[in-house]
Amino acid sequence: MDGYEDKRRDFLRKLGFTLGATLTASSVISANIVESNLDMSITPDQKEFMTHYGKWMDEFIEVIKIQKVDPENIENNRNLVLLSERAKKWQTRLHDYMKEEKFARYYMTASERMTLEI
């Protein structure tokens, strides 16, 4: 296992859950995403959460791009830690929202672009 993989795993552990665990736990839900007529409406609070999550995800994707080409970049590694700390603040809220099937479908669809970067 290379240094990048170790750092990525450490980040995901600090985040409180691994992307793999999220995908595994949501496998039943993700199987239904392919149906285009599913209701993916979410509450206003959930929409606000997803707006913040989308901004966080944009930052995370940029950090991952840098991490791939320069895993020893100190500033980027600091940003990785800061992103992790920010994510810890909303982890419980995300966990609660993921109990709702509509939100989980919406979240999985929105997170797909980050999954492709990782």
Image (cartoon, grey):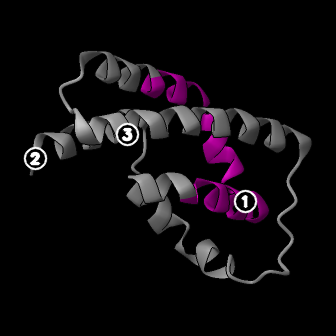
Q: Are marks 3 and 2 in contact (CB under 8 Å)?
A: no
Q: Which residue is mark 3?
A: 64
> Of tags 1 and 3, which is closer to the observer?
3
Q: Residue at x 88, y 60 (%)?
A: 41
- In this rendering, the answer to whether 94 lies above or below 89 is below
- Most foreground residue, 85 or 55: 55
In the displayed structure image, the side of residue 110 where residue 17 appears, left or right: left
Residue 50's tag is none
Q: Which residue is mark 2?
A: 2
In the displayed structure image, the side of residue 23 where residue 76 appears, left or right: left
Q: Residue at x 89, y 48 (%)?
A: 43
Q: Residue at x 24, y 39 (%)?
A: 69
- Assign a secondary structure to mark 2: loop
Q: Are marks 1 and 3 in contact (CB under 8 Å)?
A: no
Mark 1 surroundings: few (<14), some (14-19) or many (≥20) residues within 10 A: many
Counting residues from the N terminus, which is met first, the one under dot 1 or under dot 2?
Answer: 2
Q: Which residue is mark 1?
A: 106
- Assign a secondary structure to mark 1: helix
Counting residues from the N terminus, which is met first, the one under dot 1 or under dot 3?
Answer: 3
- Stretch in magenta: 83-112
Spatial CA span between label 3 and label 2: 15 Å
In the displayed structure image, the side of residue 65 where residue 71 appears, left or right: left
- In this rendering, the answer to whether 82 lies above or below 4 is above
In the displayed structure image, the side of residue 102 where residue 32 appears, left or right: left
Task: Indicate the quadrant where residue 24 lies.
Answer: bottom left
